Amino acid sequence: MTLDELFAPQGPLAKAIDGFKPRAPQLAMAHLVEEAIAGHSTAVVEAGTGTGKTFAYLVPALKAGKKVVISTGTKALQEQLFLKDLPRVRDALGTAPALSLLKGRANYLCLARLKAREADTNLLDPALLSEFTQVSRWAPRTDSGDIAELPLPEDAAIFPHVTSTADNCLGRECPYFEDCYLVKARKKAMDADLVVINHHLFFADMAIRDTGFGELIPKADAVIFDEAHQLPDIACQYFGESVSTRQIQDLCKDVEVCVRTELKDQRQLALAAERLATTTMDMRLGLGDEPQKGNLRQIERGLAPALGKVNADLDFVVEVLKANLGRSESADSLYERLAVIKSRLARVLDTGKLGFSYWYETTRRHLSLNLTPLSVADKFAALVEAQPAAWVFTSATLAVDEGFDHFCSLLGLTPAKTLILDSPFDYPQQGLWVVPRNMPEPNMQRSAEQLLAPLLPLIQKVGGRTFVLFTSHRMLNQAARWLEDKLDFPLFVQGTAPKRTLLEQFVEAGNGVLLGTGSFWEGVDVRGEALSCVIIDKLPFGHPDDPLLQARSEDCRLKGEDPFATLQLPQAVIALKQGAGRLIRDGSDRGVLVICDNRLVNRPYGQTFVKSLPPFKRTRDLDQALAFFSESS
C-alpha cells in the first residue's frame, strides 16, 4: 500500500486512529522520509506545530521494513513515542515489527549497587532510607528494572545510589552481569527492528565508538532524530571532558562501602577516602555559596592550592588501593575509576589547547570542571559519511530566516533535501502577539515589578492560565517573591517540585500561573484553556559571560565571521521559536503571546525574529490583549 493510500481520508490510519485527519504537509514529509530511507540520503525538515510529524516519519519507517533507530529529545517524548504513538501506527498498518525502548544506564536498577547498599545502609542519610525501602520492595517484582516504574520523582536522591555510571559499572566482571537489566535492554535493542532512544544515549554510544570500546546502538538502515534542534549542544557535551566533585564524592562513598563489606582490615583506606571527600568539598566552598559559571582559565591560578590538595589525596587513595589489587573486584574497579578521574582531570586542566572552551560551574553543593569542543561538525559529518544509512532530522524549530544553514553548519551536514512545512493552525485568528510599549530596556537592571506590574491586569483578565518564561533564574526568583501576594490564582514556580508534577498541577488547577526558565521553553504540551497566555521576559540571547559562548565567539572572529550574526542571533531565534510555540498546541486553542522586549521593534535584527515566529496578529497595545479575551469569553 502506498503512502497516499495509507494517509487517505478512508485509509488505514483514518480508520484505526481516532481523530486522524489527512494533512497535505504531513503527507509531503512522509514522502520525503520514505525517499531518504530508500536512497540512504540525508533530509532536514522543519515541521510546524500541528503538522503531525510523528506519524509522518513513523509510517514510512515501519513501512520500509528496515532497521530503524529513532532518537527523541527527552525521556518523556521517548516514552510517549514507544508506549502511545508507535503501537497505534503499527496496528493501523497491520505490521508486527519487533520494537524496543532503550534508555541510558542511569535509568536502570543496578543489582550490584542495590545489594551493596542492602548489605550496609549506614552510609545512607536517614532521609533516603524511606526511598531505599521502596526500591528494595520493587526490585524483586520488576521485569525491566526501569526506575520510571517507581512512584518516585525523576530526581529522587536515592537513584544515584542504586543505578550505575560508566565509571562504576563492573561490566562482565560483575557477579550480576547475566541478570543485568541494562544488558538485557541492550540485547533486546540489538534484535529489534525499530529502537527508540534519546539524544543523550545516541551521543554516549557515539563517544564510546570514538574511543574504540564498542557500540551500544545497532547499526541501522535509518536514523531519525526528532527534536533535532537539541543535537548540537548535546553532542558538544559528549565530546568534551568533565570532572566533578560529585563524581569524586560518589567514589569515596563506594570506597567506604568496599571497606565495610570486603576490605575490613583496611581502615586506612576508608579514612583516606573520607579525607578526599572533605578536600573536594573544601574546594567547592572556596568558590563561594552562590551557584556560578565561568571561564576556568580565569580562576585556575586561584584554584591551584585546592586542586593540589585534591590531587595529593587522590594519589594517596590510589596508592592504598594499588596495594590491595586482586583482593576484591570492587577494589580493582575503584582503582580503575580513580585512574580515569585523574587522567580526565589532567586533560581538563591542560587549558592551553585551541578549539576548546574551558569552564567551571558550581551548584549549591558541587563543582564541575569542563572542557567542551567549540565544534562537533567534523566528528558528526564523519559519522554520517561512514555509515551508509538514511539520516533524517526534524523539529518544529530548525530554520532561521527561512533556511537551514545555521543548523547544518553546526553538524557538518550536506542534506540531499530540505523542507519547511508551515503549521496548519490559523494563527492570525487563534492568537495575538503583543510587544508592550513603555517597557524598560532589557539591557537595564529591570526589576520583576517593572516587568510584571503592567501585565497583572492581563493575567487577571485571562483568569490565570499563564506561563511566564524567563531567561534567568535571578529574575524568576524575584518574580516569584513579588507575585506571591498579588495573585488570586495558584502560583507554580520551577524548582519547587519536579517539572512533571508542576505541569500536572498547573493543568489540574485550570487557572494557574507558572514561572519557568529554560526547561519550560520547550517539550511542554499544554492544550486547551489551561494555557491561554505566554509572557516572555526578553529575547533569549546567550549570556555574554557564558564561557562557551565567549570561546565560540572568539573562534568566529578568528575565522573572519561576525559572532552575533553567525552564532548568537540564530541560537536566540530558535530558542524564542520554542518558547512562543508553547501557546498554540491545537486547532481550537486561542491565546496571547507577550514578549517584553523593544528590540523586536527598534533593532534591525528584530525582523529576523518576526519572520521566524507564527504569523499572529501583532500589536503594541496591551488593551488589545484585554479585548482579545473579552471577545473569546
Image: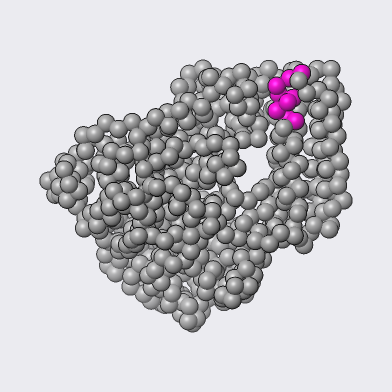
Q: Which secondary structure is most common in the magenta stretch?
A: helix
Residue 428 appears in the figure:
yes
Residue at screen point 49% across, 68% down: 570
Q: Residue at x 48, y 55 (%)?
A: 381
Image point 87% across, 51% down: which residue?
A: 305
Is 332 inside the magenta-drawn segment? yes
Where residue 279 appears, x then y in whole percent?
83, 41
In the rendered image of this protein, does residue 414 appear above or below residue 263? below
Please name the residue shown 56% across and 21% down the image.
177
Task: Pick the quarter of the image with the C terminus.
Answer: bottom left
Looking at the image, which is closer to me, 280 or 482?
280
Residues drawn in magenta: 327-335
Q: Is residue 82 above or below residue 618?
A: above
Please state if 106 lies on the left or on the right of 403 as rendered: right
Q: Return the x and y of residue 287 as percentages of the image width and height.
A: 78, 53
Question: Does the magenta-highlighted stretch encompass residue 406?
Answer: no
Residue 632 seen from this side: no
Considering depth in this image, is 386 or 293 the residue closer to the camera? 386
